[in-house]
Amino acid sequence: MPRFLPFSLAVSLLAWPAGASSQQAEPNAGRFLVLDTSRNDTLQKEMEQAAADGYRVVDGDAAYNLLVLEKVAEATPRPEYRVLSILQNQLKKASEEGFRVVPATLGTKDFPAAVIVRDPASTVRYEYLVVDAGRTATFEREIVDGAAKGYRVVGMVSGPSEHAAVLERTAGDETTAAAVSPGDRFKLLATNQSSRLQEELSDHAALGYRVLFASAAKEMLVLLERPHDVQANVEYLVVTTTKSGTLQQEMNAAASRGFRLLPRAMTAVQKRLGLIGTYGYEIGAVMEKPGAPGAEVEYRVLGARRASTLAKELGDAAAQGFVVVRLLVGYEEAVIVLERPRARSIGSLGDSLWNGVIAGAAVGALAGAFTGLVASDDCPECPGFNVPLTMGVLGAGVGSALGAGIDALLGRRAAEHVSGTATVGVAGGGNGYARADGLGGVLKPAHLAWQCALNDVRRPARRHDDGANLPT
């Protein structure tokens, strides 16, 4: 796979408002920072400088030295980052020194690589097991053996000749081994046909399995696990395409039906044709629809061959409330998937504008009818004309329009505030709402509570599917 960029570039991203110029910001002025370089030592220096400026690694591919960092909103202890280009040889010693793998940066070219981080505020140590195999059956068996020793899978990648998985456990902790179910706890699906993968995912989901990770080279591998406490049934959807624009359309169409991307289950798959061999790549992504309705989201997919183009597009998307959920290095371009809460239309069930319409109509009708009753006493010469009814209808119309307008204004302000909250940096963000002053201080908290109850607006989670607290 060719490199995404042939040169070294670190671009600071400024979340430009609409219509603002696209001039490059100072390194410490932007919210996002894209690092891309051909040398590990250069990437190491740039990460150290970025960490000193308040940035934290959120996604990337360490094998191709391409990373996205986000500036935290609050002062936090400065973490120490390193790039490990050969995990099998370097991870054991680094973990003994207090470092932990950042799963979102796991990648492979010749060998599995990842960014590791040491949190100065943490005293917890972790142990790692890196398993690799060329055959899927052997690979699955080694994962099962590692789980029996108390490890859990935190990442999986596939290279030209073999697959690799990184497993993690708290140092010296083998207590989970006793709770491990038999060999059918994990299932590894391997196919180069999306229709077959779709069918197998549906069958295994009905048996209680849940998707953990996906990787690909010559074929797409999907790792599933059957948890002990199986929750409500879920549905899976496989999306495959060669174009980032088509991917955005298909993901948004699926999101409108309740599906949501599993970031670690998105990968680049080789396209092969008989004796011709590999003739390109396509993006394969697995989306999940939980049994209970969740947050409604929409996606933006950015694809570019140059970091400067990617930087500009990422900055514009961030200004519109999108957050990074996945970076993927493809054959010809890098692809970034972003997500944000979907804005509901007035026709949507439960949309808050109906509250304003109904409340305004009711108040307007009462006020109009009362005014009509008073006026009818002064209009004895109006036979056959029901003044209270007429004034009530007119008042309802005016009141509904005013109510919708007021509710739309409050809704827009709430959405702006929620977007600002939802896109705060990973390491320093909070989930509280700001307090409003004046009349807004009375109306806005109730409105926000109603919005959150309906939409379940929350920041897209960057976590392992078992809910474990992993570094992003």
Image (cartoon, rainbow, N blue to C red):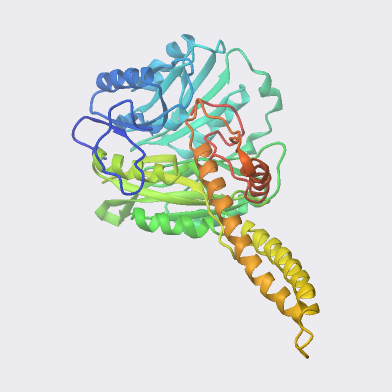
Q: Residue furthest left?
A: 7
Q: Nearer the viewer, residue 272 or 304?
A: 304
> Does residue 242 lie above or below 425 as drawn?
below
> Does residue 274 lie above or below 361 as drawn?
above
x, y (%) of residue 192?
Answer: 42, 52
Q: Is residue 296 visible?
A: no
Determine which quarter of the picture holds residue 81: top left
> Does residue 144 lie above or below 18 as drawn?
above
Q: Is residue 246 visible?
A: yes
Say left or right for 346 vs 40: right
> Does residue 382 lie above or below 219 as drawn?
below
Q: Residue furthest bottom?
A: 383
Give the residue displayed 42% in from the left and 46% down from the top. Answer: 320
Q: Nearer the viewer, residue 237 or 147?
A: 237
Say left or right for 234 vs 215: right
Determine which quarter of the picture holds residue 84: top left
Give the residue displayed 40% in from the left and 47% down from the top. Answer: 219
Give the residue displayed 27% in from the left and 40% down from the top. Answer: 1
